[in-house]
């Protein structure tokens, strides 16, 4: 289909087409929706076109996407199995364990795969990966760029994915062959792009930044004026101009004092209200973008709090309200697309977010001491569980696996004496 075919009227009696994300008609070359379609993005009131890839040129957007996707990528993801006692344990023998935890495909690490998928979900609203199976076993996940995927729900409520390959050919994949991670959705089928929803905030931020850049390139930035009670001749003016450039221009001559003659006065210019307002606007746009992605402002390098207990609380806030919903989205998407009906009863995917929730060494020591029963309280973890928490190897003796209070147990020597008696 050529570009001009988009403007041709449909013949009478032609069947109505079902709505699809990749189909759009225009009334003519003056249709206001044509320019955004050709540019591949949405036009904003500030006069710029925002696409998911172009939005990343804004440092606040890039930091939000980088922070969330990097956090999701760095955390280990395990396939857990319910044990005989109901406790969850890693099922390393399952083929899906390696795909989720270590090697999703032949060219990406698990970190790279999860980070790419999460970035696509944040930018585009959707992240797709083709499922490769050997029999019923999932052996690989091949990521698909969202721009090459069109989702459609049939009349029988089944979902199919139209994928455009690099050679231009289109293939149709059923839902069982696509791992789909979606952001907030209004129809339950396709997620909404945060960069498109926040296009006005991002567009204004980019235009404000462009305005500042144009000021440095084209604007007149004069620090002050020299006034003379009389009139300078051409030679005197040239001498004064040369002296200023030679002795007072450049960073190495910053803050030097002028020596003025013949009643001249130096009058510095103060920053204008417009300059101050531009700084406030740029800071406000960072806050707007942070709100769209759910990232606390200090994590965007905004100096809003001291780097102490306040930032630790913000870190917990970030995990609880920005990352936790994505943990659930990933885990349930794995259950829907990668596990069979029988496996869902015994297995689940699980992110290990403990690395982000750990406190200081002192806090961890106090936590583990109380958990082991220090102070006479009833212990609720064993020594081996505590060692595993801090990354140490487990002990083989029986006492290391038991819940015994060290404050109420006799010492080893007393045990031996009681045994001899």
Image (cartoon, rainbow, N blue to C red):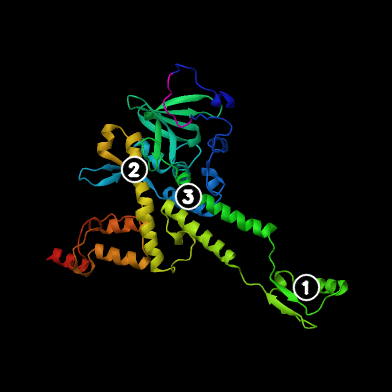
Q: Name the one closer to the observer, 298 or 410.
A: 298
Task: Tell me the residue that label 1 is attached to.
Answer: 244
Do the residues under discs 3 and 2 have CB atoms within 8 angstroms? no
Task: Tell me the residue that label 2 is attached to.
Answer: 331
Left or right of residue 200: residue 83 = left
Image quadrant where one finds the N terminus: top right
What residue is at 22 percent from the left and 59 percent from the top?
380
What residue is at 37 percent from the left and 66 percent from the top?
361
Q: Name the one closer to the observer, 90 or 214.
A: 214
Badge 3 element: helix
* Circle 1 Cα neighbour tier, 10 Å, few/some/many (<14 / 14–19 / ≥20): few
Task: Tell me the residue that label 3 is attached to.
Answer: 65
Q: Which residues are magenta?
A: 15-22
Q: Tell me which corner region of the image, top left, top right, bottom left or bottom right, holds residue 355.
A: bottom left
Badge 1 element: helix
CA gap, disc 1 to disc 3? 47 Å
Badge 2 element: helix
Earlier in the chain: of badge 3 and badge 2, it is 3
Picture coordinates of residue 280 (x, y %)?
A: 52, 63
Picture coordinates of residue 163 (x, y %)?
A: 47, 29
Image quadrant where one finds the C terminus: bottom left
Earlier in the chain: of badge 1 and badge 2, it is 1
Q: Name the one closer to the observer, 240 or 363.
A: 240
* Circle 2 Cα neighbour tier, 10 Å, few/some/many (<14 / 14–19 / ≥20): some
């Amino acid at each position: 289909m050529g570009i001009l075919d988009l403007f041709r009227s449909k013949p009478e009696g032609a069947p109505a087409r079902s709505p699809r994300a990749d189909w759009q008609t225009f009334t003519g070359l003056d249709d206001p929706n044509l320019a955004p379609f050709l540019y591949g993005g949405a036009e904003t009131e500030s006069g710029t076109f925002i696409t998911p890839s172009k939005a990343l040129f804004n440092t606040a957007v890039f930091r939000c996407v980088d922070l969330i996707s990097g956090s999701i990528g760095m955390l280990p993801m395990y396939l857990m199995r319910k044990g005989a006692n109901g406790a969850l344990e890693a099922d390393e023998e399952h083929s899906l364990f390696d795909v989720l935890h270590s090697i999703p495909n032949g060219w990406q690490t698990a970190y790279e795969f999860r980070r790419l998928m999460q970035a696509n979900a944040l930018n585009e609203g959707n992240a797709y990966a083709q499922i490769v199976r050997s029999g019923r076993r999932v052996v690989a996940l091949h990521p698909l760029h969202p721009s090459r995927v069109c989702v459609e729900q049939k009349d029988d409520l089944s979902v199919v994915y139209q994928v455009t390959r690099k050679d231009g050919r289109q293939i149709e994949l059923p839902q069982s062959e696509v791992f789909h991670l979606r952001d907030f959705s209004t129809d339950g089928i396709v997620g909404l792009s945060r960069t498109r929803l926040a296009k006005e905030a991002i567009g204004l931020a980019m235009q404000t930044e462009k305005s500042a850049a144009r000021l440095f390139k084209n604007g007149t930035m004069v620090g002050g004026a020299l006034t003379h009670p009389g009139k300078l001749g051409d030679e005197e003016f040239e001498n004064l101009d040369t002296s200023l450039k030679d002795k007072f221009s450049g960073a190495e001559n910053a803050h030097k004092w002028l020596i003025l003659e013949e009643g001249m006065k130096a009058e510095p210019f103060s920053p204008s209200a417009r300059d101050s307002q531009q700084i406030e606007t740029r800071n406000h746009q960072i806050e707007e973008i942070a709100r769209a992605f759910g990232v606390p402002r200090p994590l965007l390098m905004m100096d809003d709090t001291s780097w102490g207990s306040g930032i630790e609380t913000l870190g917990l806030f970030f995990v609880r309200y920005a990352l936790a919903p994505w943990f659930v989205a990933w885990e349930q998407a794995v259950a829907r697309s990668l596990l069979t009906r029988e496996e869902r009863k015994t297995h689940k995917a699980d992110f290990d977010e403990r690395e982000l929730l750990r406190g200081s060494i002192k806090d961890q020591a106090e936590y583990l001491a109380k958990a082991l029963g220090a102070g006479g309280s009833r212990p609720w973890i064993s020594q081996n569980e505590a060692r595993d928490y801090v990354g140490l190897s487990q002990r083989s003796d029986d006492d290391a696996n038991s819940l015994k209070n060290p404050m109420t147990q006799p010492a080893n020597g007393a045990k031996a004496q009681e045994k001899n008696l």
